[in-house]
Amino acid sequence: MFDQLRDDIRSIFARDPAARNTLELLTTYPGVHALIIHRGSHCLWRLGFKWLARLLSYFGRFLTGIEIHPGASIGRRFFIDHGMGVVIGETAEIGDDCTLYHGVTLGGTTWNKGKRHPTLHNGVVIGAGAKVLGPITVGENARVGSNAVVVKDVPEGATVVGIPGRIAGTTVSESLSEREETARRIGFDAYGQVKDFNDPLVHALDALLDHAHGLEKQIAVLADALCKQGIKVELPNVPSCEELNLP
């Protein structure tokens, strides 16, 4: 237990720039207190002293504002930053090197017995106010953004944002300049945001702009072919083949 505590303290120094010394961590960090109390209550729970385990857990909730069910399984180097309002359910499983911020809920979505809370693999970070609900799995080194609501499995290394949680893509389109030109031409300001911002809604709008640009190319080719046959075609707001640099 003392080895685990030593690892926990070292991990806090690595992840919290506000941490200054061990005495400060042991006396003023509610996440440390909650984890120490949970280690004890979890031991009692596994030994069959369920009531004592719940009583100790309740004391920890009263002291820290962090509620961890004694049945929850927590790995090494776990860090709860700030911590107020964190709730971790009975069948939750948390791997090594995970970080939770204040207001996080690892909750259930059913009243049935059995596995009903999330499983976090190693290295997961859950942002402030996020809700991860149900017997789902959050893959290794995944990230959940603040205030996201996650009800489906999260792949390894993914970042999830929004309500309901959506995976934020990281691929940048090669046709960025064409997309910007299409947006400018149709009077749509899609770029009031940081470049390469990984918001799935922004990526959906980008995909629509790419699709619109592709349609413009096809229409321009058809209009050019008709003109060569002596059929004059006037299409407002559709650029010519020359403007689109088409042969």
Image: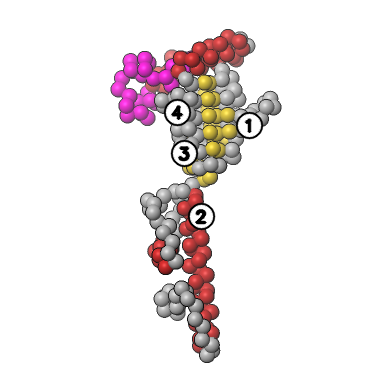
Instruction: Name the residue furthest right.
Output: 112
Q: Is residue 30 or residue 163 the one in the foreground?
A: 163
Which amino acid is tagged 1?
A: Thr
Give x and y (percent) for residue 185. Answer: 42, 68
Q: Earlier in the sequence, mark 1 or mark 2?
A: 1
Does residue 243 sit above or below 93 in this rendering? below
Q: Is residue 72 left or right of residue 186?
A: right
Q: Does the magenta segment cover residue 91?
A: no
Q: Which mark is residue 204?
A: 2
Q: Is residue 39 left or right of residue 28?
A: right
Does residue 141 sit above or below 216 in this rendering? above
Asked whether disc 1 touches disc 3, contact meaning CB atoms under 8 Å apart, the reply is no
Which residue is labeled 1 in the image? 109
Residue pictured at 46% horizontal, 14% vertical: 63
Q: Secondary structure under badge 2? A: helix
Which amino acid is tagged 2?
A: Ala
Which amino acid is tagged 3?
A: Gly
